[in-house]
Image (spheres, rainbow, N blue to C red):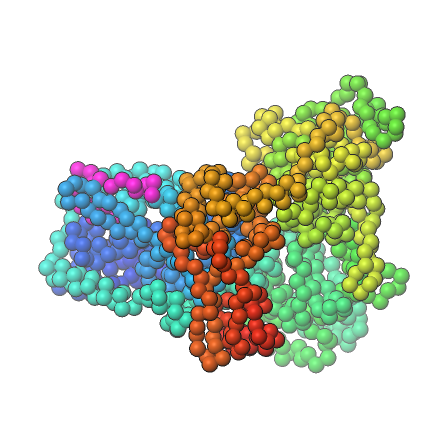
Amino acid sequence: MTEYRELVRILELEHINQGDLLLFRNGSDYLTYDNKQIVFIDGFNHLGDKQTTYIEFHPLNKQKQSCSHLLVDDSIHLYLKNKVYNLFNKILRIKDGTNAKLTHEFDKDQIDLLPNPTSITQHKFNYLFDALSTIPFAKNIITFSIDFNSTSNGAKIDFKYPLYDELCTIENNTLFDIYLEDFEIVLFKKIYEDYIMNMVDKLFHKDIEVPQNSNLYPQYYTLLKIKVILQEAFWKEYDINKWPTIKRKLIKYNEMLDNLNQFTYMLPSISKEQQELNLQSYKNEIKSRKESESNWLKLKDKKMQEIVKKEQTEIITSRDKEIETFIKYIEAAEKRYVRQINNFLTDQLVNDSIQNYNQFKNNQEWAELFYWQDLVLNILNADSASLWFDTRTDKYCFRSKVGATLVYENKEGISELLTRALKEKITDYLNRFNNGFFANHAIEIVLVHKLNGIQSQKLKQSERASNVIKILLFENAISTIDDDKFDVKSSFEFSKENNHFFYTRNRFVPTKHLLKGFNNTNLASNNAISFDSLFSLNEDSYLLETSEQELECKRSTFIEDLIFYMVDEDIAAYYYVMNWLSCFFNSLEKSGTALVLIGDQELTENILLDKIIKEIFGLQYCITINDEECKSPSTFDIAYDKLFFHIGDISNPATKFDDETLYKLVKDLLVKQSITRLNEDGEQEESIIHGQMIITAKNPAPYIKRALSKCTIIKVNDMDTIIEKLGLPDELILEDKIEKDLKNFTDILQSFKANSKFSKYAMDTKERKEISGNKTSNINKEEIENEIDAFIQAIKDKNIEYFEKVKELEDGAIYEQLKSAFDKDDGYFIGQDLLHYYNATHEQKFENKKQLMDKLKEKDEMFSQEVKTLKILTAEQKEEILFQGYKTSSETKYKELYKINDYTLAKDITVPYGAIIISSQDNIKKYNHPDLENALKLHKEYKEKKAKKV
């Protein structure tokens, strides 16, 4: 028989045992209602009739107005709130790229349709969530009500989403004193709609039927059934659960809920005094919550309660520090540090310092100072971290590992940063050598200029008194640079040239794989093939032709097998790719030929490029030529400090990289050895073009047809075929095997008997002939211009038939909203859905709303109209509405409406002299001002004054 206490375990409430009682907890505090602790008792352990300190929790209490019922309801709302937060967090982490491994749990197409967050979007959501969670048991994220059908055993569940409702009616893009971008509002709403509301609607479109064996306790059954249904859904749909045995737990929970009547004989009796106490405590608790809980208007008011504001400010501040300092700059300790930490190498400058102060060389206390400095310097060097002083910026620079962001700080800032970055590694070292006394001390690293004035004995006494180890790092122990370069022929980061006073820093820091090329290690080669017997130059001497001779293909690593099957077991293609890679791996000199791989991009981009090439040559030295990674189409900017150039699919109509631009880039990057330009000071700059080029686009023909003599075009197998030929169960195992095989594969690249002569020629293939006859463009600018004109005219004509394909989006909801907007008054359209309208009706799609809006604004001023309510503070300090935004409605989901006729342009709105725009200050210049200079001054003063108040 199931134990009575199982009724508590199913709630998954945090509790502790105290004697024979279970006391519930809320975080670190005991859970109390009406300032009385809640305890669970069974039929064999009870408190006694006169006990008034505690309130007894009876899960199956039939009285709705009881603390027992309230506890069950609270626990389920708390559970749902946390699951919604976890879901939001998971999706945001996928979208911002901080955890791409989670992507397989979601539909990729659906995820891709969501707007992309910025680096602070997650931060804003956490802020909103914490603001709504400030009041205990607040139900502002998700809530529900239960309506029992009096004529049956069914219960109808009605869910509500208060935060979602606020996002739909948000004014001035501001919620709880935080500004949300349009795309962030859309993103949060879409997550609600697509991942929460849709799921809930499917799960609860029918009444919950109470089974016969639980009909004595319909309230408890219904409440817990809601929790179990959603618990299973969050697990199966999104893999959100905290139990590894979730499947068994759900089976057990459902069996128990379907047989609640079995607990009838176990129920402890409830004394009259306890019933009265319970009821009165329930009423007091509900009254207290209503009095203390801030409502929406109060939370949105700029004069919100000080305690709420203080807590929210602390939340933001603490997260800022964590994001901007801890996460960004501190790297986790790695295993090889443990192996290397004993082999300290003292920096020559430190030895110089010791010699310059030989009056201290016999002084043990000063020796200790240099011991700690040595420790810091060697930890920095252990995992390719680096620290230097740059005379050009007069600042210190820190890099936590190869490829990490460079952080520039002054003397005080770098001391704090080094303390944060190294304290864990220093503590690990002390623990490793069982130095318990020091390991229990706090660590502080301080940069000092010279020894004069330092009283070592006083410093040591201070350390012992405060339990702080102050590690002095002398400035002259840090390399000083006044120039930098990108030299792929050197593995040293700092060097002095021609008796130069300061160091020159090499921006090229080789990966652990590329370091093999500098170590001159003699490895036995596994390929005995003669390239002269496999390839020969055609009669025009610009193209490699393959012989008909049958050759054996020797392979010894997993990645070699992968490449062999990728090129469909074509031996000539396999050796060409291996030779092309090996020559570049060992020389880092470009071949002047592009490798063009036609076929499965999941294989060519996600595997070959991302998991092999970028790992070997360094992510920071690889660039994909597209609008996201390249700020401009400048060959100089693209080639700067890069070892690999990649071109994938480019179909965005607003791209900087049309076919003609790509052709010029391909030509320059393959043919030219360097490129020059004039900088801002009128001085000539040169960028050496080091990189190899790999192309994985579906249709590269338009921009490589004029450079075919430099392109080797190979058709690749699909991912499923590769996995089958490699004998693997799935793609996850493929990636794991690649990661483990990179060392072996780079050993092969280093020892491969490469032929640099043949790497400089393209190989003739049948795909090369096919591409030469392809005349299909990727980006047809003239066609795009015509399509945009037709799109604008369709909106002006309110031609709803033009937008038929929009019906395919969101089950036709966006189409119906547009139709309602067209029919409203003299005609409107919904600005935030323009990207949906256009991309649904055209093959060539824009990547984001801004790109489309820029194009539309160029074409027609209708898209530059003012749509938001404009509030001003007059010279007399009175708030007034200068322009009223157009009223929207539920039919259009309360989205901002744009007029088709009789609209108002921002430039036609005159802001009175001395007035300040307070609703939006993003671009006040777009409005008409009698005195623009005075207006800018007033707005600047207003913003500064407002910032000081915050």
Q: Position of residue 319 (x, y in %)?
A: 50, 63
Does 220 lie within the magenta span?
A: yes
Q: Position of residue 680 (x, y in %)?
A: 78, 63
Can residue 431 be seen from the camera position used here?
no
Vertical order, 708 against 282 (above or below): above
Does 235 lie within the magenta span?
A: no
Q: Position of residue 569 (x, y in %)?
A: 69, 24
Write the start and end of the magenta stretch as one range: 201-224
Image quarter for residue 360? bottom right
Vertical order, 526 against 414 (above or below): above
Q: Quadrant of the N terminus?
A: top left
Q: In terms of depth relative to the viewer, which is nearer, 562 or 818?
A: 818
- Residue at 16 percent across and 54 percent down: it is 63
- Residue at 81 percent across and 59 percent down: it is 678
Left or right: 413, with 524 as reference point: left
- Residue at 19 percent across and 46 percent down: it is 148
